[in-house]
Image (cartoon, helix red, strand yellow):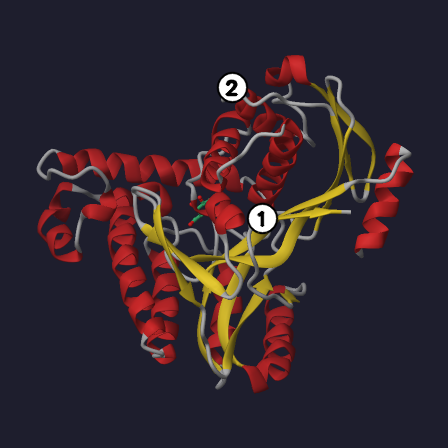
Amino acid sequence: MTKMEGMQAFKDVFGEQPTDLFTAAGRINVIGEHIDYCGGKVFPAALNLRCNVYARKTGGNTVRLAFRGIEGIVELCVDKLDSYKELKIGNYQAGVAYYLQQEGVEIVGCDLYYDCTVPFGSGLSSSAAIEVATAVSLCEYAGVAYDKVQLALISQRAENKYAGVNCGIMDQFASAMGKKDHAVLLDCSNLSFEYVPLRLGEYCLVVANCNKPHNLVESKYNVRRQEVENALKLLQTKLDVGCLAEITPKVFAEYKYLLSGVVAKRAEHVVMECDRVNKAVAALKAGDLEELGRLLNESHYSLRDLYEVTGKELDCLTAFARKEVGCLGSRMIGAGFGGCTISIVKKTEVDGFIRRVGKAYHDAIGYKASFYETSIEDGITVEKL
Ligand code: GLA
């Protein structure tokens, strides 16, 4: 949908022209998976796939929501924002409005039309993009100065407490704080961060969606989170640490006898993945893309064998990618169980890569993968129309 089409769609639903366009990004994660909620460092980047909100302030006490491709309008009354948890559509928005209000932001009536180009359930964080774009819209109309990191935290709270998904901070942070052509090295234990240029020379990142039908990802995600919390409690009986990310591979090797079964596997993934992030960032800074690719592959194997969040679709898609001569590495990103992969592919090979990997995947799985044209962009944008 072009900007003109977005504006027209807004007018068709609400009868007037929108005055503003607020956007927030979907994200990829170069490396550092399932460690944000263990105090680890992650390395995401904001995408050109985004949640676009065409907006107009109306005053009064109703926030009206409309969505591309969905009939009708959802109305949120600003006096009872805690009562929309059960909404199938609009609950993320209500949650963000509710927690902003709790922080003292006056929620002002407005009309918001959502054109989200982040595919839903893809592991590219459509929900974070929706939350952050909503938070920006509501703060702009409340006339308050806002801090983007605070918006990310409020968005995460909405997802945790309102939508019931116990996610970490990575997605909302990347969606709000992403920077064009950079990845964000974010330390989730204290939210300190560094922008690192995503310089891949003659290579680029190819994002592919395995298109596995989405099911129960949220509940499986919450189970993983519980498992690593159990691991931490057991390790804390002997180790003075505040989170799993503080444990080095060497110390873990000494103390892993405290753990058994899946809990041991989950913790091992976290410890080793934290170590890989440091190595991957060093490799990227040194221009050693082969090493970066190797670490991406290792990350995937660990998510497959230790964290057990991949599945045959993501395993096939990344395995076919790795067979390509122009591909340095490939892994699943996001929560897993379906969704997207990233691969480092030589620019001159991208067309052939997509054709061959796409065909092999279709032959093996029985339906098609999607490949997206992506670029790395800023997180939040604000524009007068
Ligand atoms: C989802 C969550 C994030 C993070 C990833 C896995 O995207 O929202 O907080 O935990 O999964 O790395």
Whether residue 336 can be seen here = no
User: Which of the labelled discs sits on residue 80, or is there none?
Assistant: none
Q: Position of residue 39 (x, y in %)?
A: 30, 43
* Residue situated in front as seen by the camera: 18 or 44: 18
Q: Position of residue 219 (x, y in %)?
A: 48, 36
The answer to whether 299 is drawn above or below residue 237 in the figure is below
Crowdedness near tag 2: few (<14), some (14–19) or many (≥20) residues, C-alpha within 10 Å: few
* Residue type beneath disc 2: Gln
The answer to whether 74 is drawn above or below residue 338 in the figure is above
Direction from residue 121 to residue 73 in the image, left or right: right
Whether residue 177 can be seen here = yes
* Residue situated in front as seen by the camera: 233 or 83: 83
Most extreme residue toward the top is: 79
Element type at mark 2 = helix
Q: Position of residue 135 (x, y in %)?
A: 59, 35
Q: Residue at x 58, y 58 (%)?
A: 47
The residues tagged by marks 2 and 1 sit, at their Cα atoms, a distance apart of 22 Å
Dividing the picture into quadrants, the one containing residue 228 is top left
Quadrant in which the N terminus is drawn: bottom right
The answer to whether 102 is drawn above or below residue 318 in the figure is above
* Residue type beneath disc 1: Ile
* Residue situated in front as seen by the camera: 19 or 193: 19
User: Which of the labelled discs sits on residue 380, or is there none?
Assistant: 1
Element type at mark 1 = loop
User: Along the polypeptide, which appears first: circle 2 or circle 1?
Assistant: 2
Direction from residue 24 to residue 63 in the image, left or right: right
Circle 2 sits on which residue?
A: 102
Direction from residue 132 to residue 302 in the image, left or right: left
Q: Position of residue 52 (x, y in %)?
A: 70, 47
